[in-house]
Amino acid sequence: MVENASNTDFAELSILIVDDDRQSTLLIGEILKQMGFGAVFTARDGAAGLAHLEQAGAAIGMVICDWL
């Protein structure tokens, strides 16, 4: 459990969102940006997501993806 999450600095954390639903990707990305996360990247499918991870390497701290 994170105590006092409002003081957590997410600016250094880059996130990759992988989802074929463009509206979901935009909504999640906007929420994460408003929460203060650093760079938010998107990919339209698993193959594009893997390609992005191969390029970015360790620069991506978290991946959010759909499973259907």
Image (spheres, rainbow, N blue to C red):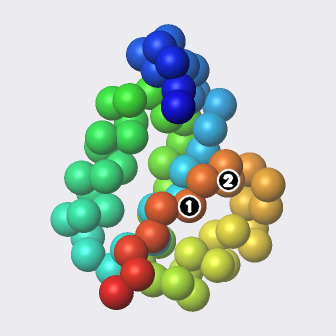
Closest to the observer: 17 or 7? 7
Q: Position of residue 11 (x, y in %)?
A: 57, 27
Residue mark closest to the camera, 1 vs 2: 1
- Residue type at tag 2: Ile
Compared with 55, 9 (above or below) is above
Q: Position of residue 48 (x, y in %)?
A: 55, 81
Please, which residue is most extreme toward the front here? Answer: 1
Q: Which residue is mark 1?
A: 63
Distance CA(mark 1)–CA(mark 2): 7 Å
Instruction: Please state if 62 lies on the left or on the right of 18 as rendered.
Output: right
Indicate the secondary structure of the residue bearing disc 2: loop
Compared with 61, 63 (above or below) is below
Q: Position of residue 61 (x, y in %)?
A: 67, 49
Residue at the image point whose x is 31% and y is 62% from the top: 25
Residue at the image point whose x is 42% and y is 16% from the top: 6
Given contact means CB atoms under 8 Å apart, are the residues at marks 1 and 2 in contact?
yes
Q: Which residue is mark 2?
A: 60
